[in-house]
Amino acid sequence: MAKPRTLFDKIWDSHLVHVQDDGTCVLYIDRHLVHEVTSPQAFEGLRTTGRAVRRPEATLAVADHNVPTTDRSGGIEDEESRIQVDTLESNCAEFSIPYFSMADDRQGIVHIIGPEQGFTQPGMTIVCGDSHTSTHGAFGALAFGIGTSEVEHVLATQTLLQKPAKNMRITVDGELAFGVTAKDVILAIIGTIGTAGGTGHVIEYAGDVIRGLSMEGRMTVCNMSIEAGARAGLIAPDETTFAYLQGRPMAPKGADWERAVAYWRELVSEEGAVYDRERSPGAPARRTWCRSPAACPIRPTRPTRAGARPWSARSPIWGSRRARRSPRLPSTGSSSAPAPMPASRICAPPPPSPTAARWPRPSAPWWCRARG
Amino acid sequence: MDKFTRLTGVAAPLPMINVDTDMIIPKQFLKTIKRTGLGKSLFFDMRYDDAGAENPDFVLNRPAYRQSKILVAGENFGCGSSREHAPWALLDFGIRCVVAPSFADIFYNNCFKNGILPIALPKGEIDKLMDDAERGANATLTIDLEKQEITGPDGGCIRFEIDPFRKHCLLEGLDEIGLTLQKAASITSFEETQKSSQPWLYP
């Protein structure tokens, strides 16, 4: 009898084009998302070597990091940002790649447009030059971030050279208390395994709590797999996944839909499948306040300055400097993983600063204030 | 890509854990459409003060380390964003080898694509190399990839492990895309099989 396989094993095995003697695999990539920050040098590489894009229709490009968060009708003011977006647009035209421009209603954060359009589907291999590509794992797709050389490799060959990751399963059973969200779940998980706890692994998230999450919640969990150091996160597809996808512009239609769903239902880890590591941290009881994903104890209240473990304790040279300096150009880097984080870049309120007095803090956090 | 065979150079100590790619090359420098020119902005926030002047205390600004070719660092080096600008910045500065107890996966991969050798060693060995690196201009290490050995300033030798295929590609400076394209027939055959079993993937 064949050895029981995990969800990761199934997706991996079904995408093997070739295995070299030393175990290096040529892995087929079903879908490739491209944005302006990590692609210009890849297209330049194709041009200088005279190579074409193997499957433009399996590729989708979007202007992402450099899109202004303010009024965009006048274009992009910053010259370098504008050049980068213009370069993406001309590269897509030259290589016939579908492109959502800044003026397109479908434009959005690169990790979100895939699910919104139904471009992201269970069982696929999906890559993008961005570490938070792990987001798509919420659909039961093997999705991971790659560097620019690998972007060029996928454009030219529709494959990547890879070695299989290790399997890790994190089971979260129980029930989430009022006000506790998917973000708290993943922060609690990272607090348990550490910011390098997932290095070399693909994490499959399982258990009642994960099953009970919406697709948005599942994407939140898988998105932060990279903050745990993991290559990717995975959640087996189920009725919630199918309901989200049905009717999306790029999702299968008609007979193809029925056939696809039948295939997707098989995408679960088999009974008895062996994982290299397993953890069952239990549902977080309370909302998380944290300064770094590695230091996220579940606390009933926001920590005080004195009680919190300062980032500077982890990297003495860096902590104080980094916390002091603000990002210079907020239009870039918005969705690249900043893991592990210093104070104030994620869920935690910023540390008290001289400017804080100008921004009166509400007596209760936004999520427990009355609406309307 | 330049071949990596044997490297002799000054090793700079960076005794910090979780050095992420945004520390290596901050986000504001990602707006370039080239691979070159990032060396001057390597470790920007640590290397320069708010007025843009060099911070004399930062290791790469100290006279002994300005020509460093090797970096010795703490655990989980290169975590965070997938930006390949991080190895590009290291390379542009002149760093061809990073030695640390552990690396983040994407950064580790990206190094090999650019002729940089990342070496993971047990913490005890790193402590020794960190001590060597603290010796300033005398902190010269020799990395021999063929033999998989690091030789210290006093002749001490440390062996390291590396994936054989990656070693081969670095030693020969091979173009991975060219290698993969030699398997174009297998890729086509895979696509034909997948198209018949999962036609929805080929709209």
Image (cartoon, coloured by chain):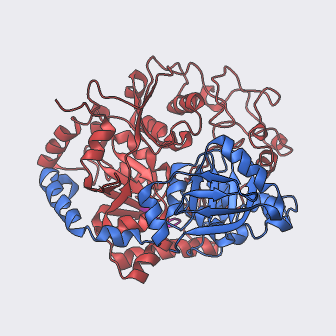
Chain colours: A red, B blue
Say which residue appears at 67% left-offset and 19% top-offset.
A300
Left or right: A134 in relation to A66: left
Examine the image and state in which quarter residue B96 appears: bottom right
Give residue A150's position: percent from left, percent from top: 43, 63
**Quick check: can you spot residue A104?**
no
Of B194 and B133, nearer the camera is: B133
Give residue A343's position: percent from left, percent from top: 72, 41
Left or right: B134 in relation to A71: right
Q: Main secondary structure of the magenta part?
A: loop
Say which residue appears at 34% left-offset and 41% top-offset.
A139
Looking at the rendering, the stretch of residues picked out in magenta corresponds to A34-38
**Relative vertical location of residue B175 with respect to residue B84 in this rendering, above or below:** below
Quadrant containing the C terminus of chain B is bottom left
Of A261 and A147, nearer the camera is: A147
**Relative vertical location of residue B196 with respect to residue A257 in this rendering, above or below:** below
Q: Is residue A192 magenta?
A: no
